[in-house]
């Protein structure tokens, strides 16, 4: 005969060992299940007591019966003769405690009890999981990629399985099963099939948390991230502000020799990050947001949150960016709908001609307000005549590229335009000023446009 009692005890103690549930809580659940079994078999639980001790692997059931001369209800009464067989000193109206063997419940009830227990355990685990990850929303976790599907990736983290949908992945990243991955806990959904914990590497908050981890001044609140605009895997613009005038917000984020920003860029698979200093003046903020382009001036309509940026003709492609990415990110960062116009279209004067202060900021310039420029080119560079550059042109011969910059490009293997294969290669050359880099990129793009035509 099967020992159902030991089977029940083993089943419940195994669950107690495997599940991360408080033993006191599990004891109560088991007690509740046994009372349910008693109810099904006897129709009542009034005269029954259940004592559960999973530490000792013990489940005891006691039934209290009244000692009577003649038994009318065998569930609540016991005859005097039967009671004295166990306890000779029993008398009429005494309470007789009888031990109930769990085996008497039968296999069917025991299987049902185990199923009920498993369901209650799942409900508890579900609630614990929801509570835990609801409190962890916005945190970065480090998990292991368990499975990769077409539309989502499953990540194992501690005892939970997390989901990273395709839209929360960085597009140019390639994931492998078994790899360790860092991601942001973005959302917790109470799905009927079980809690669905969504993690993300594409969310802007993931980048913010990375900055908090790498830049102590941000974590401590000395530097604030005022705004962020991100195209995951491609480019991000972030505006920062220092609450301590002694600390340079941009410099702190970049770190000594760029060590801080490089750690973040590496984590994001070489995503480009433009860090600018925040300003309450929308004209200055928009000018900085359009970096690496240097607008000549900005006209701002604060009521409709629109802005018009006047750009040097040779910097227009940089200001707009590939597929409009630069201006789009700048608009999202500043909250202004930014439009650009070439200086020559505005004034009828080519940017290659000499631009005097009066011609740029005079009252005849369509009523635009004066915008102080940051790090503008020299007058000699602005006045330089147009040159037809070829792939064989030496980088040092390009007007607007300084000798120091040309030397840095040469060290990196770029002596002439033909040596350049992509703009990204140019951006990776360290120590070059934005002015020289922007000029070389502009010439490189124009040369390729001309070749395609």
Image: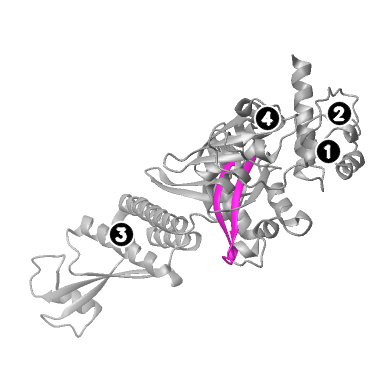
- Of the numbered discs 3 and 2, the one sitting upstream in the chain is 3
The Cα atoms of the two marked residues, 1 and 3, are separated by 81 Å
Q: Which residue is mark 1?
A: 401
Sort mark 4 into few (<14), some (14-19) or many (20+) by Cα contacts within 10 Å: many
Above or below 328: residue 278: below
Q: Which mark is residue 392?
A: none
- Of the numbered discs 3 and 4, the one sitting upstream in the chain is 3
Q: Which residue is mark 4?
A: 317
Q: Position of residue 338 (x, y in %)?
A: 54, 36
Q: Residue at image x 51%, y 54%?
A: 138
- Of the numbered discs 4 and 2, the one sitting upstream in the chain is 4
Q: Which mark is residue 417?
A: 2
The Cα atoms of the two marked residues, 4 and 2, are separated by 18 Å
Residue extent of the magenta highlight: 219-243
223 is within the stretch colored magenta: yes
Query: Which is more foreground, mark 4 or mark 1?
Result: 1
Sort mark 1 into few (<14), some (14-19) or many (20+) by Cα contacts within 10 Å: many
Q: Residue at image x 79%, y 23%?
A: 447
Above or below 383: residue 217: below
Is residue 234 visible in the rendered structure shown here? no
Secondary structure beneath label 3 = helix
Q: Is residue 152 left or right of residue 28?
A: right
Taking depth in this image into account, of 339 and 358 the one nearest to the observer is 358
Q: Which residue is mark 3?
A: 33
Q: In the rendered structure, are the residues bearing label 1 and label 3 in contact, judged by CB atoms less than 8 Å apart?
A: no
Q: Residue at image x 76%, y 33%?
A: 441
The Cα atoms of the two marked residues, 2 and 1, are separated by 12 Å
Secondary structure beneath label 4 = helix
């Amino acid at each position: 005969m099967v020992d159902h009692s030991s089977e029940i005890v083993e089943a419940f103690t195994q669950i107690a060992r495997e599940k991360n549930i408080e033993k006191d809580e599990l004891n109560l659940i088991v007690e509740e299940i046994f009372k349910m079994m008693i109810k099904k078999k006897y129709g009542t639980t009034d005269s029954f007591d259940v004592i559960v001790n999973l530490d000792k692997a013990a489940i005891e059931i006691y039934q209290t019966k009244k000692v009577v001369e003649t038994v009318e209800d065998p569930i609540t009464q016991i005859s005097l003769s039967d009671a004295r067989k166990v306890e000779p000193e029993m008398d009429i109206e005494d309470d007789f405690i009888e031990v109930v063997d769990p085996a008497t419940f039968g296999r069917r009830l025991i299987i049902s009890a185990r199923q009920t227990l498993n369901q209650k355990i799942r409900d508890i685990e579900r609630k614990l999981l929801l509570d835990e990850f609801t409190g962890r929303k916005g945190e970065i976790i480090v998990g292991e990629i368990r499975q990769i599907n077409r539309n989502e990736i499953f990540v194992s983290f501690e005892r939970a399985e997390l989901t990273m949908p395709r839209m929360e992945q960085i597009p140019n990243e390639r994931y492998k099963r078994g790899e360790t991955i860092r991601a942001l806990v973005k959302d917790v959904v109470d799905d009927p099939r079980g809690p669905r914990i969504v993690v993300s590497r594409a969310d802007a908050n993931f980048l913010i948390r990375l900055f908090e981890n790498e830049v102590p001044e941000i974590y401590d609140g000395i530097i604030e991230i005022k705004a962020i605009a991100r195209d995951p895997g491609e480019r991000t613009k972030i505006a920062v502000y220092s609450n301590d005038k002694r600390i340079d917000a941009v410099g702190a984020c970049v770190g000594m020799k760029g060590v801080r920003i490089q750690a973040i860029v590496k984590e994001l698979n070489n995503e480009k990050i433009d860090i600018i200093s925040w300003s309450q003046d929308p004209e200055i903020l928009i000018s900085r947001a359009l970096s690496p382009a240097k607008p000549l001036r900005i006209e701002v309509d604060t009521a409709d949150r629109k802005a018009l940026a006047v750009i040097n003709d040779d910097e227009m492609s940089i200001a707009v960016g590939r597929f409009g990415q630069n201006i789009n990110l700048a608009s999202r960062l500043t909250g202004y709908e930014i439009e650009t116009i070439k200086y020559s279209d505005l004034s009828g004067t080519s940017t290659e001609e000499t631009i005097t202060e009066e011609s740029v900021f005079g009252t005849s310039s369509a009523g635009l307000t004066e915008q102080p420029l940051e790090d503008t080119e020299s007058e000699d560079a602005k006045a330089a005549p147009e040159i037809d550059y070829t792939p064989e042109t030496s980088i040092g011969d390009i007007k607007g590229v300084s000798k120091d910059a040309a030397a840095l490009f040469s060290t990196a293997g770029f002596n002439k335009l033909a040596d350049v294969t992509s703009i990204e290669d140019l951006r990776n050359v360290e120590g070059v000023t934005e002015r020289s880099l922007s000029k070389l990129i502009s010439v490189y793009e124009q040369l390729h446009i001309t070749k395609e035509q």
